[in-house]
Amino acid sequence: MTERAAHLVDHVLPDVPVRQWVLTFPHRIRYLLAWRHDLCKAVVRVLLREVHRHLRGRARERGLPEVRGGAVAIVQRFGGALNLNVHIHALVLDGVFARGDDGRVRFHAAPELDSADVADVLAAIAPGVQRVLARLGGDPDDPGASDAFAETSPLLAGLAAASVQGGVALGGTLGARSRRVGQISVNRHVPEPGMCHARWEGFDLHAAVRVPAGQRDRLERVCRYALRPPVAGARLQLTADGQVVLQLRHPWGDGTTHVAFTPTAFLERLAVLVPRPHVNLLLYHGVLAPRAAWRAEVVPRGIPTATADAHVEASASDMTPRPSARGALWADLMRRAFEVDVLACPRCGGRLRLIALIEASAVARRILTHLALPADVPRPSPAR
């Protein structure tokens, strides 16, 4: 997560405004996307096509006919309660690139976005996704459509279907929903969409997070959020009766703050969050795509030295060289993620350096014994 986010900020995303577009699908579509990565890539193209169509339309209003945009799309498979919720985080350059009369490629930031713009984009995305599903044989409303997921992996398909609905597929609580903890209210409060947020027929599009140019640290935090794993260990706890309790990042509308699972149900949730082998959940589009014609003029020369606001043009020639993308040091990643310099000596403030890696078990045992530290490998706890 940290290394990939650092790579995106240092070597992929130019220093221009970036807006995060998050597209969530109805439950029936999440089940299909969990198995078929071709559908995932197709709906990502639909999302980015409509977002870029909106950006190009705003650019034409400003007299920029030939423009190109770019984006990095991240497919997330999980929801806040470890439920199967395949959705898209798209980090879209909030504007377009155009070639000027002098032959140089310049970035033109998009005007301010509002909820009506997001609703217009969503109104084009939803039918586009339905057309893609119908064309690729994944229409959940087609009674004659076959379920390749259930035919190929019936057990995993059953787990996925239960996870999408927030239920349990195995054990004595078959079909039951996970136990909720908190001040549960019968009347669940569903908040109205806020700024740059729209909903329609089960689709949800959120585009309120925008990182201005020059705020690379904040952009890296957004990248880490989109690339994060399903759950942090600090949010999990094991109760005395063997239940696994997950603390939610944000309370639900009915007051739920924690969700409790049996060990079997917890493993069910984790099992369906694993993507299929050889599936890439990080997709590049537009000028950021590997073979894009303008990519060499936009990406590799580095980051603009001057900070730009939403209406300042950034030229690709005003770039400083970037460091190599290979071999990110673990100490640098610790500093970027946790703001902790692990190579700073706590005694003198000088710099620590790696002397050797001890791989021979006999040598490691002698060192640990000399330091009066345990040298025996602890036995694993028996399975419950």
Image (tube, grey):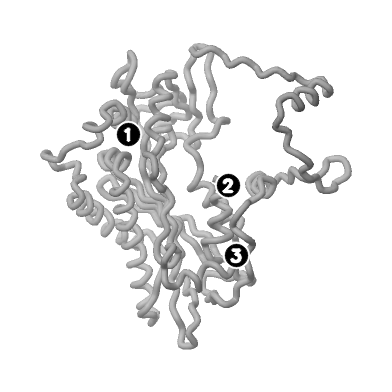
Residue kind at label 3, given as amino acid type: Gly
Residue topped by disc 2:
2
Which label's residue is closer to the chain start, 2 or 3? Answer: 2
The residue lying at 33 percent from left, 52 percent from top is 41
Disc 2 crowd rating (10 Å Cα; few below 14, some 14-19, many 20+) is many
Dot 1: element: helix
The furthest residue to the left: 144
Q: Is residue 276 visible?
A: yes
Residue toward you, 347 or 149: 149
Which label's residue is closer to the chain start, 1 or 2? Answer: 2
Depth check, mark 2 against mark 3: the one in front is 2
The residue lying at 78 percent from left, 21 percent from top is 373
Which label's residue is closer to the chain start, 3 or 1? Answer: 1
The numbered dot on residue 258 is none
Q: Position of residue 375 (x, y in %)?
A: 73, 20
Residue topped by disc 1:
164
Disc 3 crowd rating (10 Å Cα; few below 14, some 14-19, many 20+) is some
The numbered dot on residue 214 is 3
Q: Position of residue 120 (x, y in %)?
A: 30, 61
